[in-house]
Amino acid sequence: MTLIEHLEELRTRLLISLAAFFVGMLVSWFVVDHVLAALIRPVGRVVFLAPTEAFLVRLKVAALAGVFVSLPVVLFQLWRFISVGLTRNERRYTLSLLPVSLLLFVTGALCWVVNDADRPARLAMLLRACRPRAVRDPRRPPHQRR
């Protein structure tokens, strides 16, 4: 293949991957309430400090879920692009690792979803890591804040 043919192939694979991501994000948009409820449950409540923040959080969660949903298509497109340049032995070796990789990925995802008892501890660890120095309460008037 010439350089131009390789670039055309790359463009095709990238467009298919982007389309899969946007379809995954669109599908995830309709279930984002359930995902947010599961993420917020350990914390109890969430305070939004800007008018657009609630929408942007929903959009980010839908985008992340879209990545998760579209990952098989993206990885398949990556494989189709890379496999052309591999030798027969390299291709066979890589394909032998695929079932184990898929099993580990699905197992990790299921452990995160199913293991509800440990989720508050994991969330608390993440919140400690990004603890701000001072948080202002948006419900209190400015003259009462200190």
Image: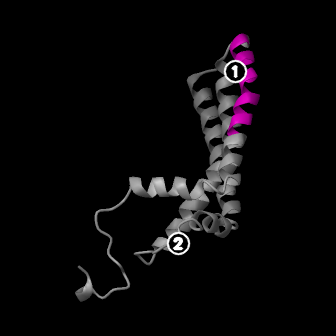
- C-alpha separation, residue under disc 1 versus residue under disc 2: 41 Å
**Percent coordinates x, y for residue 117 in the rendering:** 64, 56
**As shown in the figure, which amino acid type bears the numbered disc 1?**
Thr
Question: Label 2 crowding class (10 Å Cα cut-off): few <14, some 14-19, many 20+?
Answer: few
Give the SS element for disc 2.
helix
Which is more toward the observer, 116 or 134?
116
**Percent coordinates x, y for residue 54 in the rendering:** 51, 73
Magenta segment, principal secondary structure?
A: helix
Q: Which mark is residue 109?
A: none
**Percent coordinates x, y for residue 10 in the rendering:** 61, 34
Vertical position of residue 17 compared to residue 44: above or below: above
93 to the left or right of 122: right
**Percent coordinates x, y for residue 114 in the rendering:** 71, 53
Question: Label 1 crowding class (10 Å Cα cut-off): few <14, some 14-19, many 20+?
Answer: few
Q: Which mark is residue 55?
A: 2
Q: Quadrant of the C terminus?
A: bottom left
Figure quadrant of residue 136: bottom left
Q: Residue at x 67, y 52 (%)?
A: 115
For the image shown, how many numbered marks are present on the structure?
2
Q: Residue at x 75, y 16 (%)?
A: 92
Vertical position of residue 123 compared to residue 10: above or below: below
Q: Quadrant of the N terminus?
A: top right
**As shown in the figure, which amino acid type bears the numbered disc 2?**
Phe
Give the SS element for disc 1.
helix
Vertical position of residue 140 compared to residue 17: above or below: below
Colouring: one colour
Question: Circle 1 is placed at which residue position?
Answer: 94
Which is more toward the observer, 17 or 31?
31
Q: Which residues are magenta?
A: 89-105
